[in-house]
Amino acid sequence: MKIDFHTHAFTESIAKRAIEKLEGLAEQKALTDGTVASLLQRFDEWGVDKGVVLTIATKPSQQTTINNWAASIKSDRLIPFGSVHFLADDWEAELERIKELGLKGVKLHPDYQGFEIDDERLTPIYKKCASLGLVVLFHAGYDCVSPDYIHAKPEASLRVHRRVPEMKMVLAHLGGNYLPDDVLKYLAGEEGEIYFDTSFIADVYDDSVVEEIILKHGTDRILFATDCPWCSGKAEIDMINRLSLTDEDREKIFHKNAERLLHLD
């Protein structure tokens, strides 16, 4: 069983436009056309059984539409997360609605949404997510949309975790994109509900760096992920299989940790 904890798709009406824009920003060719059908095709090719589909409200007015669409794609193979915007007047009610829709969590992107991860204005949102049992997945570290300023540095993420330790916090890109030294210094090994996903690292880090972070943090809190359409599931799976881990550790990373975190049957 393999559960990809970090994937992206868009509505049919905007998928082509969204992918073209993101390809330009990332200067990278996408591995899907942005649609759910294309994502599922990649799952089949890579041997992925299920995936978390992440959405992001880049402005307050997008919340309702995005969350309705997320709920509409929920299936045996797709586990969609919702999103809220911290500047929306109704973010609290929308989080409650996300829970009612049966979504398992929310995605927050400090770079795209324009906040620093440890901004005090976000603390009420974090606490509300925790009270509702919603997992919160953050983009962490460098992002091409904001190349000169990192909105979620490892030390700031640590402050958030200690401020709201009850929040189930997933930090994408192994805790901080392109910041492995800071992840090792500030985050890896920190106790509590703080998880790292492995998205977009197979072609970025040496295996020795990945292994060091995973073993220091503990295999109980690492989640297999790709960031599809930006990284190949085959590349991420091959990387995890190359690491000096036990078969039990790999099972945890590939699916058991996700099953526990998301309360999957």
Image (spheres, rainbow, N blue to C red):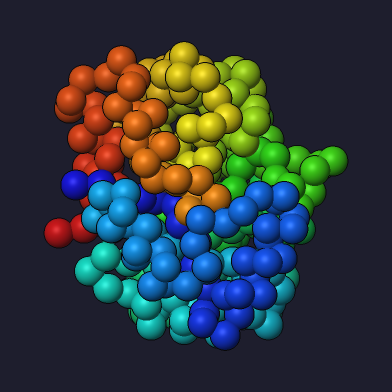
Residue at the extreme left:
265
Residue 252: percent from the left, percent from the top? 24, 35
Residue 210: percent from the left, percent from the top? 46, 22
Residue 11: percent from the left, percent from the top? 52, 80
User: For the point 19% across and 47% down, which residue is it?
Assistant: 1
Instruction: Say above or below: 131 vs 239.
Output: below
Horizontally, is 35 left or right of 233 in the view?
A: right
Horizontally, is 222 left or right of 35 in the view?
A: left
Is the C terminus in the top left, top right, bottom left or bottom right quadrant? bottom left
Towards the viewer: 2 or 55: 2
Towards the viewer: 255 or 2: 2
User: For the point 66% across and 50% down, which residue is it?
Assistant: 28
Towards the viewer: 257 or 32: 32
Residue 181: percent from the left, percent from the top? 62, 18
Residue 222 sits in which quadrant?
Answer: top left
The number of discs equals 0
> Do we see residue 74 in this rendering?
yes
User: For the point 34% across and 65% down, which residue is it?
Assistant: 40
Towards the viewer: 108 or 121: 108
Residue 102 sits in which quadrant?
Answer: bottom left
Horizontally, is 251 left or right of 17 in the view?
A: left
User: For the point 34% across and 64% down, which residue is it?
Assistant: 41
Residue at the extreme right:
148
> Do we see residue 137 in this rendering?
no
